[in-house]
Image: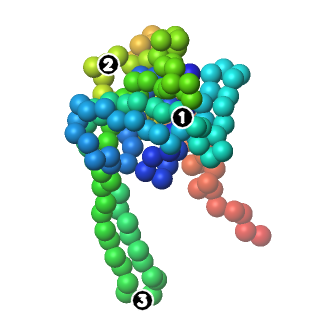
Amino acid sequence: MYAVIRTGGKQYKVATDDVLAVEKLTAEAGSSIAFDEVLMLGEGEDVTVGAPLVAGASVKADIVEQTRGDKIIVFKKKRRKNYRRRQGHRQDLTVVRITDILDADRKSTAATAKPTADAKPKGDAKPKVDAKREAKAKPAAKAKGADKETAAKSSKKPAAKAAKTKAKAKKPAAKE
């Protein structure tokens, strides 16, 4: 079963045992919290959409840690006016693990939910923010595990294509 919740001005699709980073919540690490703004509940084909909220539904979560996001640089510039401003920012985040989804009848869905193959163990506290980094690392790991010939062929192909395109770009046009 899954739910769509609203917190910090954003909406998140969550399921049991999901770990996600949300805007900062005022609570200590290790404590429990309930998200009462549930916009939608769903299980397969059976979907309950709220107007705007699903009455009586809530999502329970445990706070894993209080952390900060990656640094971003805000740079403003007006050309030809000698105006440049640079400012950094790091967002305060709270990493939460979803423990239970309660529907309008206050039935817990954790008992009826089947554990998925990609469910993370309780000890792992990595937020979904790092999914981009993991996706980039997976292709490199596959190349290392493949036999040497396949890895050599895959590494030579892009370089050969790049050399051909550079050679074509450098030829000057013939003048008449």
Looking at marks 2 and 3 on the same chain, the residue that comes earlier in the sequence is marked by 3
The crowd level at tag 1 (other Cα within 10 Å; few <14, some 14-19, many 20+) is: few
Question: Disc 1 vs disc 3: which is toward the camera?
Answer: 1
Residue drawn at 62 percent across, 22 percent down = 43
Mark 2 and mark 3: Cα distance apart in space: 55 Å
Mark 1 and mark 2: Cα distance apart in space: 27 Å
Task: Say which element carries label 3.
Answer: loop
Q: Residue furthest right?
A: 176
Instruction: Indicate which disc residue 56 carries.
Output: 1
Asked whether, in this view, residue 143 is left or right of residue 162, the answer is left
Amino acid marked by disc 3? Lys
Question: Disc 2 vs disc 3: which is toward the camera?
Answer: 2
Instruction: Indicate which disc residue 112 carries.
Output: none
Estimate the x, y position of residue 4 in percent, counting from the top left.
55, 36
| Circles 1, 2 touching at the beta carbon (< 8 Å) | no
Residue with the mark numbered 2: 122
Estimate the x, y position of residue 144 in percent, counting from the top left.
40, 18
Question: Disc 1 vs disc 2: which is toward the camera?
Answer: 1
Camera-side residue: 137 or 16? 16
Residue drawn at 60 percent across, 30 percent down = 41
Amino acid marked by disc 2? Lys
Tell me if residue 19 comes above or below residue 110 in the rendering: below
Looking at marks 1 and 3 on the same chain, the residue that comes earlier in the sequence is marked by 1
Residue with the mark numbered 3: 81
